Image (cartoon, rainbow, N blue to C red):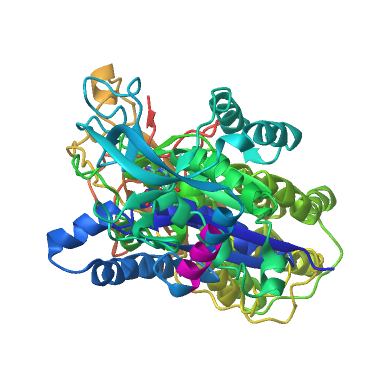
Amino acid sequence: MKSTFYITTPIYYVNDVPHIGHAYTTIAADVLARYHRLTGSQTFFLTGTDEHGQKVQQAAENQGVNPQTYTDNIVTRFQDLWKSLAISNNDFIRTTESRHTKVVHEILNTLLKNGDLYENTYEGWYCLFDERFWTEKDIVDGNCPDCHRPVEQIKESNYFFRMGRHRDWLIEYINAHPDFIRPDTRRNEVLGFLQQPLGDLCISRPKSRLSWGISLPFAEDYVTYVWFDALVNYISAISYLGDDTTFKTWWPVSVHLIGKDILTTHSVYWTTMLHAMGLEMPRTIFAHGWWTVDGEKMSKSRGNVVDPNAMVREFGVDAFRYFLLREIPFGQDGDFSKSAMIQRVNSELANDVGNLLNRSLTMIERFAGGIVPPPRPSQDGDLEREIKEAVGGMKDRLDMRLGALEFHRAIEEIWRVVELGNQYIERSAPWKLAKDHTKKETLENVLCTQMEILYWLTLFFYPFMPQTAEAMAKQLGITIHFSNPLLGTTRWGAFPSGTTVAKGKPLFPRIETQPTQPEPVVLADPAGTSEVPLIGIEDFLKVQLKIGNVVAAEAVPKSKKLLKLRVDIGTETRQIVAGIATKYAPEEIIGKRVVIVANLKPAKLMGVESQGMVLAAGDREVEGLLSVLESVEAGTKVK
Ligand code: ME8
C-alpha cells in the first residue's frame, strides 16, 4: 500500500503583501512535499489565503474598492510569488470560495444541533487591531497587551463554541502523543497554557461591526470570527462533507506547518473543534521560529520588510530557498542578513557545489572527449566505499532528518557527499592519471564515479533546490523524471555510461561584494643585486599578503608556463596569471588555498592582465605553491 502525506501551510492574510516569513513556511512545506513525492508517497500540499476579517475590510475601504475586488487583486501576489519560488502546491484555497464557505456552514449547523454552540452576551475589552477581546487583567493602562493600541469596552451578544469542555481530553491527548505538537518547547508551552482554566471561544461578530465574513447559517446578523472560518480550510480543501474518498485519503493531515505566532489557535482552538466534530487529530502541528532582519523585528513601520521577489532577483530562487533552510535550525528564531546569505552562497554553493560540477565536467571533456566512460575496477577502494555508503544510506538519514523537520541537518548530510566528491577528485588526481596510459582504466573509473556522485546529488538537491537539480541533470547530459519515486528505487551505478555531458553556465555565480582596493604600493626592486639587502619591518608591512581560494583555472594560450587563475580573496575575485603550468594542471589547483600578494600593481603577462601574484616555492622552476595548514577563510591576511 502506498503511504500518503498531506502537508499544509497557514493560509496567509491578504491585508498585506507576502514577505520572507510567508516564504519561509511555504518553502519548508515545499521541500517536504517534494521529498515525499521523490520517495514515493502520494502527496498533497495545500496553501492558500485567509480573506475575511476587519483588516481586509478596512484595507479595501481605504482603497475605495469592495473587499472581494481587493482580495482578488492581492491574492495574485501570493500566487505569483509561489510560482517564482518553485512552490509545488497541489491546491490553493481561498476562504471566499464557495467550496469553503459551504463546509463552514455545514459544520456550524452540526455543532449547533449537537449543543456545541450557544448564544451569550459578552462584555470585555476589545482591540480593533488584533480583532480580539481581552479580560480586565490582560490590558495595560487601557491598552492592548499585544499591539499597545487603546482597547474599547464592548458589550454584545455573540455565539460561543464550548471549547472549555475539551480541556482535560486535550491535555491527555498531548501527553499521550509526543509527535502531536512539536518541537518540544512548543508542546510544553501549550501544556502550560492548558494549566489555566480553558474558556469557551467566541466564534462570531455582529454584522453591524464586521460585514466581511461568512454569515452564520442560523443567525444572518452575524458572521463567523476569523479562526472558526480560517482553520476549516484544512478540511474544506480536501472535500470534507463532499467527496468522502478524497477526504479519507488525506485526513488526518501529516503536518500542519505554522509559525509560533499561531500555535494556540492551532493546538487548542483547532484541535478542540476537530474533537467536537468527531474527527481525528492532525499527526503533527509544527511551529517554527521567527525571522528578524539585521537583528530587528520585521515591520512596515521600520521599513525593513524583506520582499522575497527581490531576493529571487538578486540571488536566484534556489540560493534563497537553500539559505532559509540552512541558516537556522527549524524551530528556532533566526536573523536574516544579506551578508550571511552572500557568505553561504559563495562558500557552499559557488565553491563546494559549483567547483565539484565544473571540475568534473571539465575533466570528462578533457580526458574522455565529453563522453562518460563505463565503470571500471576501483582505484581508491576505501574512499569509494565511503562514498557508496554515504550515498546508499542517505535515504534513511534524510527520512530521519526530514521526519524530524531538521532541514539544516538534512542539508549537512547531503553536503557530506559534496565534500567526499571534492576529496575524491583531489585524491584520485585524474590529471596525473591522464599522463600515464597504463592508468587508462583507473582514469575511466574515476571519471565515471564522479558522474555517479553528481547524479545522486541532483536527486538529493531536488527537494531543496529544484531548478538546480534540473540544470545539473542537463549539464550531466541526462533527463531525470523527478516526479517519479526515484529515492528508494534507484541503486548505485544508475548513471548511464556513454552519455555526452553538456557543460553549461556556472550554477551559482559568485556574488561579488564591493572591493576595497588597497592603495597600490611601489616596491623597492631588489633585482640585480647579488646581495639581498635587509629590509625593515615597515618595508615588509607594505606587502599585503592574503589567503585566496582558486575558483577557476585555465591555460594561457600559447604559453607553456602560465595559467590564468580566478582567485577569491573574500571581498572580490581577482584574475591572477601565474607561471605554474609546468607543475600544475588547471583542474588540480581549483579549490586550493593559496597565498597571494594582494597589493601588487596590475601587470600584463602574454597580454593577459594579472591583478596580483601567487606565492610559490622554487627558484627557476616552481616546486610547490604556498598554502596554509588550516581551513582559513579566503581573504584572511597573512602576516
Ligand atoms: O496568521 N518569521 O496569517 P499571516 C517566520 N491568516 N515566519 C513568519 C514571519 C516571520 N517573521 N512572519 C510571518 C495568519 N510568518 C492567519 C493564519 S491559518 C488557518 C490562518 C509566517 O498572514 C508564519 O508561518 O499573519 C506565520 O504563522 C504566518 O506567516 C502568519 O501569516
Image quadrant where one finds the C terminus:
top left
Residue 611 point in image, percent of width and height:
29, 50
Which stretch is magenta? 99-108
Residue drawn at point x = 45 percent, y = 36 percent: 633
Q: Image check: 282 left or right of 528?
A: right
Residue drawn at point x = 50 percent, y = 54 percent: 231
Q: Image check: 519 left or right of 23?
A: left
Q: Nearer the viewer, residue 106 or 169?
A: 106
Residue drawn at point x = 26 percent, y = 36 percent: 154
Q: Nearer the viewer, residue 567 or 172?
A: 172
Image quadrant where one finds the N terminus:
bottom right
Residue 610 falls in image quadrant: bottom left
Q: Nearer the viewer, residue 584 or 457?
A: 457
Residue 50 point in image, percent of width and height:
39, 59
Q: Nearer the viewer, residue 212 or 609?
A: 212
Residue lying farthest to the top in this orientation: 536
